[in-house]
């Protein structure tokens, strides 16, 4: 296998683990069922909207921001021009109702699916694809960790009331 093919394969496996959860044994860094999608499956809109401090971020906010980020880093792969990004817009979601929470989760699923599809079908695995894969993985893993910490705090708050 060429280095290019190995890099593509590894990036796609890591994206699968980060979002879908591989759960096939031999995971690189996550326990089973701890990727984005299994993590969010049991989260209600109310819990996704709970800020730990007044005016703070929420699970819904981190989820929306992650989808926004994926759409930004894949612009070039889609053939869209780059340009200035309004990052404040990526944090506009805080509180959601049931329908809004479903939209935010669907947005993350769609952004992830598009990222994987663009990387998988790239004619060559060049610098741009490598950078997108690394950026998507590291940024998404950071926010997944934040969401999982939020869930611990939300559970503790709920148990205390």
Image: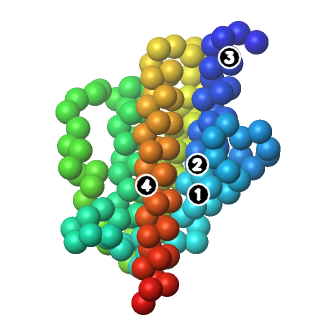
Residue tagged by mark 2? 19
Q: 7 or 50, which is in the foreground?
A: 50
Q: Nearer the viewer, mark 1 or mark 4?
A: 4
Question: Percent from the top left, x then y, of residue 37?
Answer: 58, 57
Instruction: Please give left or right for residue 128 compared with residue 88 in the image.
Output: right
In the rendered structure, are the residues bearing label 2 and label 1 in contact, judged by CB atoms less than 8 Å apart?
Answer: yes
Mark 3 sits on what residue?
Answer: 5
Q: Are marks 2 and 4 in contact (CB under 8 Å)?
A: no
Please tell me whether mark 3 sits on a helix, a strand or a loop.
helix
Residue at x 71% of width, y 53% of height: 32
Q: Which of marks 1 and 3 is nearer the N terminus?
A: 3
Residue 37 numbered tag = 1
> What crowding class fits label 1: few (fewer than 14 Cα within 10 Å), some (14-19), or many (20 or more)?
some
Residue 62: quarter of image: bottom left
- Name the image quarter holding the N terminus: top right
Earlier-in-chain disc, 2 versus 3: 3
The residues tagged by marks 1 and 3 sit, at their Cα atoms, a distance apart of 27 Å
- Real-space Cα separation, disc 2 to disc 4, in angstroms: 14 Å
Q: Where is residue 139 in the image (x, y as percent from the top left)?
A: 43, 40
The residue pinned by badge 4 equals 146
Query: Dots 1 and 3: beta carbons under 8 Å?
Result: no
Comparing 136 with 119, the one in front is 136
Q: Which of marks 1 and 4 is nearer the N terminus?
A: 1
């Amino acid at each position: 296998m060429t280095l290019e093919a190995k890099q593509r394969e590894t990036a796609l496996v890591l994206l699968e683990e980060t979002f879908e959860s591989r759960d096939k044994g031999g995971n690189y860094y996550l326990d089973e069922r701890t990727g984005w999608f299994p993590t969010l499956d049991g989260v209600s809109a109310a819990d996704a909207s709970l800020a730990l401090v007044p005016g703070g971020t929420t699970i819904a906010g981190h989820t929306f921001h992650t989808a926004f980020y994926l759409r930004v880093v894949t612009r070039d792969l889609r053939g869209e021009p780059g340009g200035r990004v309004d990052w404040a817009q990526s944090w506009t979601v805080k509180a959601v109702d049931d329908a809004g929470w479903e939209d935010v989760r669907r947005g993350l699923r769609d952004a992830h699916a598009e990222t994987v599809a663009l990387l998988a079908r790239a004619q060559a695995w060049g610098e741009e694809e490598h950078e997108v894969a690394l950026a998507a993985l590291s940024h998404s893993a950071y926010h997944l960790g934040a969401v999982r910490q939020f869930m611990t705090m939300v559970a503790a708050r709920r148990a205390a009331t």
